[in-house]
Amino acid sequence: MEMAISITDLSYTYHDGTPALKGVSLDISRGESIGVIGPNGAGKTTLLLHLNGILMSENGKVKILGKETRKENLKGIRRDVGLVFQDPDDQLFMPTVFDDVAFGPINMGCAQEEVRERVAQALEWVGMEGCEQRSPQHLSIGEKRRIAIATILSMSPQILVIDEPTANLDPRAKWELTVLLRGLSMTRIVASHDLEMVAALCERTIVLDNGKIVADDATPIIMSNTVLLQRHGLAPASGIIEPRDRGPLLNR
Ligand SMILES: Nc1ncnc2c1ncn2[C@@H]1O[C@H](COP(=O)(O)OP(=O)(O)OP(=O)(O)O)[C@@H](O)[C@H]1O
Ligand SMILES: [Mg+2]
């Protein structure tokens, strides 16, 4: 069967010489829900940015639904892959929430009525109905993140890629989003430090560290491997000094 995503030996170095990915190979089947976890600077965002050709590397190959991420394929690939950025300010640029969420459907050529329906549905999914006329710039960070997710859901992409979806979300919004994402049938790739959300959402988890995949297995197997999680900065190391053991800091 054709893979949703097929990455072969992908390496990427930023212009300043920072190596961010070092020989990543990964196959993701259609309909899979995959967690990408790893410490700060591991390369998660860099990997995700390759999935719709925002970044393209000479070193290695990225195929989306059988099409290589090359300039001539990008239009189709960007319709197939919906990417929610780590920073919602990178996603929101229109004067109103409605315009931002409607932007994708309008671009896809949807008729006015369908655009309205898609916007209403996406805003309901993220619990932001009634905010159509507000300015995205004046929303709280958590609200912005929900709208950023809505701008992608309104396009119903075949592959949904989300970078840190639960950052800045309150517990209720986080669980509502997890339930929503779990109910979707498209291929989903989620980069996160939020192991609780990944455990609830993803059947398979990849651990990335220092630009390399260091583990790729069923989520329960990864999550129960405390040594692995500790080694890659995803669980508190044993023997860590608790702040209270250092004595009162404020009264000194
Ligand atoms: N625009 C850039 N220019 C130079 N180096 C960069 C750039 N963006 C990221 N890097 C570097 O590339 C490496 C991987 O960064 P990346 O943002 O992919 O990590 P991450 O796993 O998403 O981290 P986080 O958990 O903090 O989001 C890091 O060493 C980072 O400093
Ligand atoms: Mg990141």
Image (spheres, grey):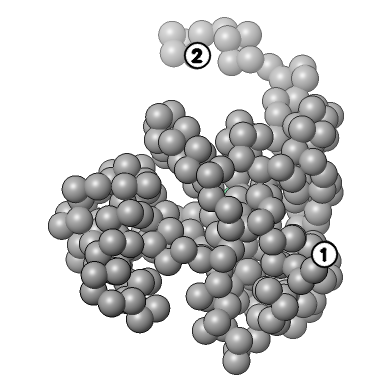
Above or below, 161 against 79 in this view is: above
Q: Position of residue 185 (x, y in %)?
A: 58, 53
For badge 2, the amino acid type reads Leu
- Label 1 sits on a secondary structure element that is strand
Residue placed under numbered mark 1 in the picture: 25
Can you say which quadrant of the picture contains the N terminus? bottom right
Q: Please tell me the numbered disc located at residue 190.
A: none
Q: Where is residue 46 in the image (x, y as percent from the top left)?
A: 63, 63
Q: Where is residue 177 in the image (x, y as percent from the top left)?
A: 46, 41
Q: In which quarter of the image is residue 199?
A: top right
State whether residue 19 appears in this view.
Answer: no
For badge 1, the amino acid type reads Ser
The residue at the point 79 percent across, 63 percent down is 27
Closest to the observer: 249 or 211? 211
Residue placed under numbered mark 2 in the picture: 249
Are the residues flagged by discs 2 and 1 in contact, CB closer than 8 Å? no
- Label 2 sits on a secondary structure element that is loop
Q: How far apart are marks 2 and 1 (CA)?
A: 47 Å
Residue 144 is left or right of residue 183, and the answer is left
State whether residue 187 appears in this view.
Answer: yes
Q: In which quarter of the image is residue 76?
A: bottom right
The residue at the point 38 percent across, 62 percent down is 154
